[in-house]
Amino acid sequence: MKNKYLLFLFFLIFFAESYSQVNDKNASDILSAILRSGKITSEWVDRAILTGRSSSPGGKYILWYREPARIWEEALPIGNGRLGAMIFGGVADERIQLNESTLWDGYPLDPNNPKSLKALPEIQSLLFENRNNEAVALAGKTMMGLPSGIKSYQSLGELWFNTPVINASDYIRSLDLSTAIVTTKYGSGGIEYTRESFASSADGVIVVQFTADKKNKISFSLTLKREQDAVCLTDSVDPQSLILRGQLPIKDGQGIPRGLRFAAQVKAVATGGKVTVSDGVLVVNNATSVILYIAGATNYPGLKSIASGIYSSSANPEQICAETIEKATSKSYARIKADHITAHQHLFNRMDLQLGIVPDSLLSLPTNERLKRAKDTGCPDAGLVATYFQYGRYLLISSSRPGGMPANLQGLWSWQMNAPWNADYHTNINIQMNYWPAEVCNLAECHEPLFDLMDSLVEPGSRTAKVQYGAGGWVVHHLTDPFGFTAPADGVQGIWPMGAAWLCQHPYEHYLFSGDKEFLAKRAYPLMKGAARFMLDYLVEAPAGTSVAGKLVTNPSVSPENTFLLPDGRRASFTYGCTMDLEIIHDLLTNCVEAATALNTDADFRAECAAALERLPPLQISKNDGRLQEWIEDYRETERQHRHVSHLFGLHPGREISIATTPELAAAARKTLEARGDGGTGWSMAWKVNFWARLQDGDHANLMLNNLLRNGTLPNLFDTHSPFQIDGNFGGTAGIAEMLIQSHAGEIHLLPALPKAWAAGHVNGLRARGGFEVDINWSGGAVVDARLKASLANRARVRTAVPVAVTCAGQPVAITRPGPQLVEFVAEAGKTYELRAGQ
């Protein structure tokens, strides 16, 4: 016992000393930033000692803090869709972690398994005979991709610098969502220092400006670092620059290097003082102001090239960086900053949201303290919710721009060489959730990279469909990457050939919101038709003796990442005709019929889709508990509160289940949600916000939103699975929009799921299907007035809880009232219609 006590005491002393060393900022053994070596982690130590208590910087949509980030998840993100950075805001020691959206390990290959097609009939027979786990075993041996996984998205590198400032007062760091600028301010020795950081989409660079309110007071040393596969070099051409040069080491089966080449460059331009570069370190001494220009590039050919069959590029990343910086430095800082803000606000300023009055006592709190208050009280303040909504829009603007890559599992931001789940494109909900806010939250342009990714997957997905299933069309399983991986991966749960079908909802939604028939004809419909062709070929008739004999079902079929118990108590994942499969197929085929009708094309294919729809099994309600069945049989799930609620796809984002048209299914969906519980991972809680909004239960939707902020949100408002996973941010933003407007059911429903907590407020700039932009003011839980801006000539059908009159330019508009709480009128393109309550 005595030895155990001494051992415990030893560890206690060791821990205390280690903790002191990390937190005592004067400890002599803490190296300055540029001298640090070893493994890069999420943690960071700034040697500065802070005193004083700063006040709020003001502004409506601001994240702000009174101390630098100590871990990556506290740093603040900036991005221009291609380049991203996490700003830690250090004083003595600063860390800026960098990303370039195309820097992925891996290369294009053919992962299709030729054994799959031969084994498929036997696997299907085993499942129809209820020999589920025998089917799983055979599928695991014959259907998995070769290789059965993909490589990771990677960090571009890190910029670390240290300054001589060790003691600072009145420290503050902030991110202004409306300008996309991170600001770090502090005082020391009677001098006020300011750093501004932003990622300019207009000029393609990250910019960091250092200023002080006295001359010749800025000094620092910086270097570029990367965990592996790169070196930091002095630029032989530019004496004020450092270069990070690297290539990923992956080789193909013949030993030929296939990894991407990449580079980053940082250039310092000082006013006053001196800039020197030596041995991979850039030193600034006694400057009055300094601007850092940071560029990054790879030789990835781009999604449009991949879609055209071009899989390599001769681009020189270092040359791209140099040319980008040369162009940027030809402009003044004021011009670069103004152009950046203009480009950002072109997207960001389309929306405004207020959910109630926030008292000054809360506005004076830093973001992390407001978040802690939400955790403690169970109720985030209205201003924090509105900021969270706009933060989701900010993240989409920052991580997904036309011509670039789509947002991955971590958006744009990842510090690791092997990120969680490879920070890949998960297609069994995650990448789809990333884009739920794109249309309704007035960021349609940000949707485009997803369509580019889909285009790049058609050719490899067609090969997978043919080789593995003997089917036409194109298919994607539950994950993919920028190199066209479409085969099953990551274990038998990856034998889920529904990814392309679900993805195809997105271009069709883009058409529904925009009314762009050229887009529908040239991009959306071809993608949809190809995915539908695969599904029509993949469906098989359930044989006699099964519960849905004569119906068309998928086989094999899994409900994403979930398992069930067989009658003998064994766990299984495979069956046939899972509910989610049937709902996704119903959605895709229904959309294909509508699209073909709108384009007046493909009558035979339209008829084939309609016929298949008639033969799908109906959604089933459990006779045991009244819930919507997740599987074709009324199996008991192994995890009652599993994070995926896949079988409610028909409620959201689909439109097969509705409280108006399918009340029994809606009631079963409600029971399903009640059983799943109000917890879960961040993205799971975000999905539940949308589910409850579709059930028009605003208070329960708000409960889920509160839980998301309390239990699924990191200090910098990033969503956490855990770890960080960005889809919950986007799903949460979409959920708030879904509480304020819905237009999926053929009408524009204003405030369909408004919670009691949001009794009064306004929202400007939401979009509705049919080509409308919508502003709403409300009080007492009901619409006071609303404005619909029509971009198309269309018939508007609007549902409100109170009667309204409609005017245009002050003149009454002829309306009909087809039902309670409904008004209908003909809208002309380019005109704005005002709806006012009480008339």
Image (spheres, helix red, strand yellow):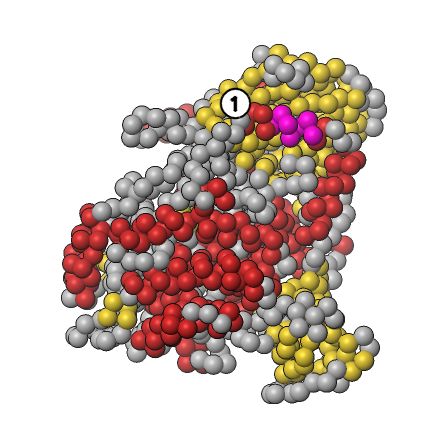
In the picture, measured across the screen, residue 310 lies left or right of residue 211, that is left
In the picture, measured across the screen, residue 93 lies left or right of residue 468, that is right
331, 275: nearer the viewer: 331
In the picture, measured across the screen, residue 42 lies left or right of residue 830, that is left
Residue 119: which quarter of the image?
bottom left
185, 767: nearer the viewer: 767
Residue sticking out furthest to the right: 214
Q: Which residue is mark 1?
A: 245
> Which quadrant is home to the N terminus?
top left
Image position, residue 813 (x, y; %): 75, 82
Secondary element type, mark 1 = strand
Which residue appears at 32% of the width and 65% of the height? 536
Which residue appears at 62% of the width and 41% of the height? 80
Magenta highlight on residue 163: no
What span is in magenta?
Answer: 321-327
Q: Is residue 190 visible?
A: no
Image position, residue 607 (x, y; %): 38, 74
